[in-house]
Image (cartoon, rainbow, N blue to C red):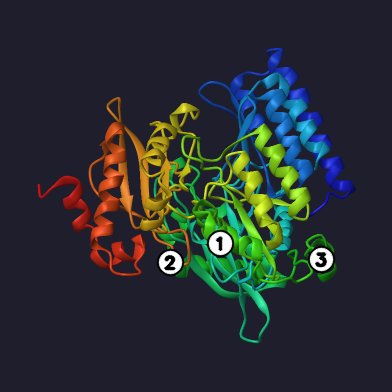
Amino acid sequence: MYRYDEFDHAFVRERVSQFREQVERRLAGKLTEDEFRPLRLRNGLYLQLHAYMLRIAIPYGVLSPRQLRQLATIGRRFDRGYGHFTTRQNLQFNWVKLVDVPEILSALADVEMHCIQTSGNCVRNVTADPFAGAANDELEDPRPWCEVLRQWSTLHPEFSWLPRKFKIAVSGAAEDRAATGFHDIGLRIVRGPEGRNGFRVLVGGGMGRTPYVGQEIRPFLEKRHLLSYIESILRVYNLHGRRDNLNKARIKILVNQLGIDKFREDVEADWEATRKDAIDLPAAEYARINSYFAPPDLVPGPIKDEGVEQRRITDPTFANWLKHNVRPHRVPGYVSVVVSLKEPGRTPGDASSDQMDFVADLAERYSRNEARVNYTQNLILPHVARSDLLAVYDELRSKGLATGNYDLLGDMICCPGLDYCNLANARSIPIAKEIAKRFEDPARQELIGPLRLNMSGCINACGHHHSGNIGILGVDKKGTELYQISLGGSPKDDTAVGTIIGPGFRAEAVPDAIDTIVSTYLAKRHDGEDFLATWRRIGAVPFKEALYGNA
């Protein structure tokens, strides 16, 4: 993983010192909340319903054991002993005190972490495939390019005050595991016409109030032109994006108002006029950054382990975990392990300080000193020897982290909702827990098969409800919390926005509604069909009739 150089260290320390002085002025009454707000937001600090929330950047989702342990320590010392992993591969502490924030930022700087640009109208944390550098379907590791983008975008003088926040995701594998189609810019590493790798560039995707799937602006961009081309996209957006209406300020609105052809024309014209003077990444600088992502020295081994195979036969719970939470690795004899943060009864995405310490220990002993965060709010051990799987599983199970539900209905994405967020209209965590309880039987989840259920407590869609095969959105109707259900969304290569199925349900009726949807799917599916395939074949009518009758 990338390690800070002297500039990085000095820059982050200077930022901590600046914010310490700003906090002191706020506490002394020398800054009003209105004056302080833009300063705290530039440092990832939000004022939520009950306390301040601090959002910590985890660039492209990569964590060292040292960093994970520091997050655990911060959780114990300054929060309530846990943190919440988010859909942008970040971590949030929801109960921090303003007076403690400078000390937290200093502790983060000790382990090469910060909160810069986790808020504000700037380029946010760049996300990536959580299996990057390990996946067996990978064309090229996207993480060096994520780091290039991170360094380029941090406090960029032209793009620090965009019309609205800006999100980029990069994927280098055959399967899109970074939801690139739902980002302001989505980058897919592809093979070009002459056999060289480059980028397929998508633009204008996003969720929120008006969800859109990103559109292709360039089928192939040479890697050496990545920065200059993205500069042109951002420059066109910065010049023409709406600043008079918060709800219409995202680049997705501009792209869809102009049309992709006109937007592409404007970007290409700007690029042609400026790229000779723009910053295209020197080969030596890319080589320097890429060197930090050299794959671990793994000795290929047998693709089967006798102990694992015997346990698979005798222990159904282990077999279920092995099937769903263990993923193929590029090196024979190794796997990537998904550490589930979705044990029934717990808040999806929450990890206690003890659990973070524990995963850090596992990463040291079994995963070449590396852990990952994925946007579905789980942790990953990317480089585990197959011969170590039994030990890893038994240790995970002892801490409640071995639930075998990855990409099944129990692996729900859920935002904090009205329990924490002052933007939310409805609670999400209690509903998610009730649904998880209803479907906690592993045999039932296995029968249902792959099914992504996502839930948001407001239209901002932090829970990615638009991209769920089943999506749930909490809304407020004259003081009553109702839950709107959509079907047919997908965050993968077949990116799609879910279709609202009908009127919303009261909180207590939501688990029954999900049960009805699932039962309808099971009754209507053909052999081998997953939920999304059945939905696309039969459409909305059977689900509407099951939920609402023929009225």
The residue tagged 1 is: 186
What's the distance in space between the residues labelled 2 and 1, CA to CA? 14 Å
Q: Which of disc 2 and disc 3 is earlier in sequence? A: 3
132 with respect to 186 (left or right):
right
Q: Quadrant location of the N terminus?
A: bottom right
Q: Nearer the viewer, residue 63 or 92?
A: 63
Q: Which of disc 3 and disc 1 is earlier in sequence? A: 1
Q: Work out whether 477 lies above or below 138.
A: above
Q: Work out whether 479 lies above or below 60.
A: above
Depth-wise, is mark 3 or mark 2 nearer the camera?
Answer: 3
The residue tagged 2 is: 494
Looking at this rendering, what residue extends furthest in the bottom direction? 194
- Of helix, strand and loop, which one carries label 2? loop
User: Mark 1 near mark 3, Cβ–Cβ under 8 Å?
Assistant: no
- Residue type pointed to by label 3: Asp
Instruction: Give the image quarter of residue 129.
Output: bottom right
